[in-house]
Image (cartoon, grey):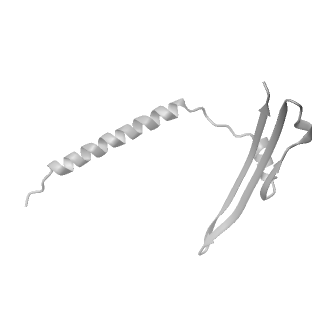
Amino acid sequence: MPLPLAPIAVFALRTGVAAAAVWAVRTAWAARQTPGRTDQRAEDALDAMDEGLALHRPADRRTDDESQTNAAARFRRTIRWGKRGVEVDAALLGRLRIRRV
């Protein structure tokens, strides 16, 4: 019994066109991105954070025209299944600065 190749060819062509479009978009996007960097001071600050959520407004950063709010959060857990597991360590530092101009 002969195998009809026309429907398979249409599917393969559509899939190939979609894959080529995704590849072109990813290549263009990657060319526009700037390379990241790792700052060891920031890494050390993230490692030194306590677990939980902290939000504060430092008094030494406040003037009549400017205020600053800092936030820090850390989530650290070990997830195990069977004899294997993974450690999840997520840390976040944030700053919101508002100035009158």
Most extreme residue toward the top is 101
Q: Looking at the picture, does residue 25 appear above or below residue 91?
A: above
Single out the residue that lies furthest toward the bottom: 82
The residue shown at (83%, 36%) is: 67
Instruction: Say left or right for 36 vs 58.
Output: left
Question: Is residue 20 shown above or below 75?
Answer: above
Query: Which x, y percent locates residue 21?
Result: 37, 37
Q: Residue at x 51, y 31 (%)?
A: 31
Outermost residue, left direction? 1
Count of labels in the image: 0
Tell me residue 52's x, y (percent): 77, 58
Q: Position of residue 96 (x, y in %)?
A: 76, 39
> Which quadrant holds the C terminus?
top right
Image check: 72 left or right of 61? Answer: left
In the rendered image, the vertical position of residue 73 relative to residue 87, given as above or below: above
The foreground one among 52 and 30 is 52
- Is the residue 29 above or below the residue 16 in the image? above
Please provide percent x and percent y for residue 40: 76, 42
